Image (cartoon, rainbow, N blue to C red):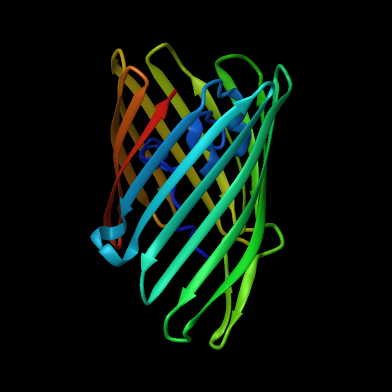
Amino acid sequence: MAQDVFVSGSRYQALSDASVGLSDCWSVFGNQAGLAGIQRPTVGGSFQNRFLVNELSTRSGLIVYPIQSSVFAFSLSQFGQIPFRQGKYGLAFARKVTPKLNFGLQFNGYRLFLSEENRSVSSFGAELGAQYLFTDRFVVGFHVMNPYRTGVKLSSGTFRYPSRINIGSFYRLSDLFNLTTELENDFEDHFIMKTGIEYCILEKLFLRAGVAGKPYQLSGGIGFQVKRLTLDLATVYNQYLGNSPSVSFQYQF
């Protein structure tokens, strides 16, 4: 199964990336339908040091801009360093179809840099998502990425970008606790169950934890808000490869 190296913000990472039911600017890397609830222009950025190896780090940025009843977003992400580096660029659109139904669509451009072959190759993909708000406390989400198995041909074979389908939920258990769940499938026989919990310690201060498998991963993090600025820290622990710390921010204008 191809692994998605274009990670989302640290809030999602801390929740084991169980994000299909969430709604904020980082939905541009999760379920684009979640962008429909954004009411202010927002910018954000993130950095993850995967397994504490600089050559496996990911840098991402985004801009979200609501226009009347629609929301548009542009995102970019870069993984790795020379001699092997990947880039992803996304243009997303989201809107509320009804008061209870959100819809999102994103077109992606991929670029793979191959210094050994002295060239770069490009490819294109798409993502589609929806969210249904049963109540203001319970949301079910659906998301599909690259169902036609986007890939590029190399001299050593075919390199394929991740293809997956996700279904999950967000449940506000109380004013202090949020629960997220998600089931992911790669269109074959590989399933991953993810669960995350978010606890509001104090106003504008959050603790988060998550678990996913297989491979089994534990995650945790903290987030806090200062006026219109939100900062998040997280780490993901893989049972075989160790820790992947990350940091992200978002600012609403």
Split into 4 quadrants, where in the image is the C terminus?
top left
Q: Is residue 78 left or right of residue 69?
A: left
Split into 4 quadrants, where in the image is the N terminus?
bottom right
Image point 67% across, 65% down: which residue? 149
Residue nearest the viewer, comparing 173 with 3: 3
Task: Please identify the residue farthest to the right as the structure is shown.
Answer: 97
Can see residue 50?
yes
Q: Position of residue 13 (x, y in %)?
A: 39, 42
Q: Quadrant of residue 135?
A: top right
86 versus 247 height, above or below: below
Q: Is residue 128 left or right of residue 48?
A: right
Q: Quadrant of residue 176?
A: top left
Can see residue 18?
no
Q: Position of residue 123 (x, y in %)?
A: 63, 67
Residue nearest the viewer, comparing 224 with 18: 224
Image point 53% across, 87% down: which residue? 156
Q: Is residue 209 left or right of residue 65?
A: left
Residue nearest the viewer, comparing 159 with 200: 159
Q: Quadrant of residue 21?
A: top right
Q: Position of residue 131 (x, y in %)?
A: 65, 30
27 versus 190 height, above or below: above
